[in-house]
């Protein structure tokens, strides 16, 4: 009987150890890496929108300047 209980206890200890290691890896490596990746993805989207916004602003500014120059030339 003692052999069976000792074997069961060692298996239970081994399972608990690997569960602990899994939780440790999950909270110390996977979650921070996922947060960093998500943050970089959001920044990339924001930079892309900023770039698109600046391009639209420059095109609009160029069109306004051309319209002003045409009006000045017609006067």
Image: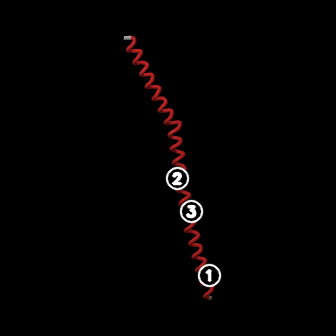
Q: Helix or strand or loop: what does disc 1 sit on?
A: helix
> Mark 1 or 2 closer to N-term?
2
How crowded pointer 2 is (Cα within 10 Å; few <14, some 14-19, many 20+) is rated as few
The answer to whether residue 21 is above or below residue 35 is above
Q: Which residue is mark 1?
A: 69
- The answer to which image quadrant residue 70 occupies is bottom right
Q: Position of residue 53 (x, y in %)?
A: 55, 64
In this view, the residue in front, 13 or 57, is 13
Of pointers 2 and 3, the one earlier in the residue sequence: 2
Residue at the spot 60% in from the left edge and 84% down from the top edge: 71
Q: Position of residue 19 (x, y in %)?
A: 45, 29
CA gap between label 1 and label 2 equals 40 Å
Q: Nearer the viewer, mark 1 or mark 3?
A: 3
Circle 3 residue = 51
Residue 42 numbered tag? 2
Quadrant (top left, top right, bottom left, bottom right) of the C terminus = bottom right
**Is the residue under label 2 in contact with that under label 1 (CB below 8 Å)?**
no
Q: Quadrant of the N terminus?
A: top left
Q: Residue at x 47, y 26 (%)?
A: 17
- Residue at image position (51%, 44%) is 34
Label 3 SS: helix
Q: Position of residue 72 (x, y in %)?
A: 63, 84
């Amino acid at each position: 009987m003692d052999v069976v209980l000792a074997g069961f206890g060692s298996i239970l200890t081994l399972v608990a150890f690997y569960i602990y290691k899994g939780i440790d890896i999950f909270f110390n490596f996977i979650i921070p890496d996922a947060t960093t990746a998500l943050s970089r993805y959001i920044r990339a989207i924001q930079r892309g929108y900023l770039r698109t916004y600046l391009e639209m602003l420059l095109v609009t500014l160029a069109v306004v300047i051309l319209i002003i120059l045409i009006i000045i030339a017609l006067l």
